[in-house]
Amino acid sequence: MMTKDIKKLLKNHERLIHSEHQKVVSHVQREQDDWFINTIMIEDISTAFKYKRKKLYKSLAGHRVNMTYYMEQESIAGMSFDVMNVVRIKVA
């Protein structure tokens, strides 16, 4: 069930996508400068979801999450990959 905040966010930003009750199968956190880059993989989806945090968090592996994100292309070693940049994530 989407809240007013999420509906408003989706209305104002056409590229955003919202998914609910997605099962996290993998969660990796790595430090980069002053940030922790979090990468999660969702069940039955082969694209990585990435977001940044200032602190380490508990692993989300095995949890169900609600996410708001948008798709981007990321170039690694000259190859282009689809990556979902997470704007908002909450445990469902």
Image: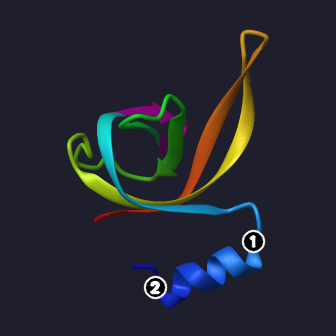
Residue 12 is situated, as x and y percent measured from the top left of the image, at 75, 79
Amino acid carrying mark 2 in the image: Thr
Up the image or down, 58 lies above or below 88; here it is: above
Label for residue 82? none
Q: Which mark is residue 13?
A: 1
Q: Is residue 55 left or right of residue 45?
A: left
Decide: marks 1, 2 in contact (CB < 8 A)? no
Span highlighted in magenta in the image: 28-36
Q: Is residue 75 left or right of residue 41?
A: right
* 29 with respect to 60 (left or right): right
Q: Residue at x 71, y 80 (%)?
A: 11
Q: x and y percent of residue 32 in the render?
A: 52, 34
Q: Residue at x 52, y 48 (%)?
A: 51
Residue 34 in sight from this viewpoint: no
Question: Is residue 68 in view?
Answer: yes
Between 15 and 78, the one lying in front of the other is 15
Residue at x 54%, y 79% (from the top left corner): 6
Which quadrant of the figure contains the C terminus? Answer: bottom left
Q: Residue furthest bottom?
A: 4
Tell me the distance, in whole angstroms, between the alpha carbons under discs 1 and 2. 16 Å
Which of the image's four quarters has the N terminus?
A: bottom left
Q: Which residue is mark 2?
A: 3
Q: Secondary structure at mark 1?
A: loop
Q: Residues within 10 Å of mark 1 (few under 14, many from 20)?
A: few
